[in-house]
Amino acid sequence: MTAPAHLCYTIYQGATFRRGFQWCTAPYPTRIVNGELVNAQTGRPVPKTDLTPVDLTGCTARMQLRADVLSPDVLLELSTENGRIDLSGGEGRIAFILDAATTADLPYGQNPPATWCSAVGQLEILHPNGDVSRVAEISWNLNPEGTR
């Protein structure tokens, strides 16, 4: 089991949100140092030639945004089923997509679950054989819209 990546995204309320990353593996343990993927044993940068994209054929994905991991309230749900996560790009690409109407409807404020300005989510990939991988832990920020 590889430790999940730690990512941070900002949703701009009222704007289309499209972000993502490529899930790859290396033949040795890795970690991120100052935003760069390095060999966990040597501290040297990982060459792109050492990375192998994960095959996501037949996989689905899910994530629930919450004020904190243990909160019972789901602020926003993203999945391949609702079209907010896309695994069809090939080569291990995982994309998050929120249309402008969805981001405009997100209730900005500091009182979850009625309103929120930051959230956390854990991306899980469900493989055809029944395995589940936690690929990333993502901090989300909501930036309010001034033009309405």
Image (cartoon, rainbow, N blue to C red):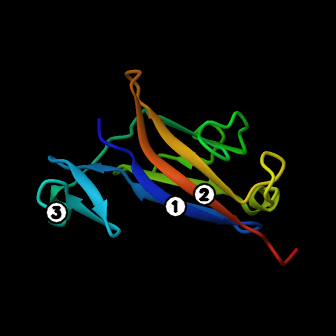
- Residue under the point 38% across and 40% down: 56
Quadrant where the N terminus sits is top left
**Which amino acid type is marked by label 1?**
Cys
Badge nearest the viewer, 1 or 3: 3
- The residue identified by callout 3 is 43
Image position of 59 with respect to 28: above or below: above
The Cα atoms of the two marked residues, 1 and 3, are separated by: 23 Å
Image position of 126 with respect to 138: above or below: above
How many numbered badges does the structure rendering display? 3
**Horizontal side, residue 115 vs residue 35: left or right:** right
Pointers 1 and 2 in contact (C-beta within 8 Å)? yes
Quadrant where the C terminus sits is bottom right
Using the rendered view, name the quadrant where residue 9 is placed: bottom right
**Horizontal side, residue 3 vs residue 117: left or right:** left
Q: Residues within 10 Å of mark 1 (few under 14, many from 20)?
A: few
- Residue 137: x and y in percent read 48, 48
Secondary structure found at label 1: strand
The Cα atoms of the two marked residues, 2 and 3, are separated by: 28 Å
- The residue identified by callout 1 is 8
- Residue 6: x and y in percent read 43, 54
**Which amino acid type is marked by label 3?**
Gly
- Residue under the point 22% across and 61% down: 38
**Which amino acid type is marked by label 2?**
Trp
- The residue identified by callout 2 is 140
Front position in the image: 12 or 36: 36
- Residue 78: x and y in percent read 63, 44
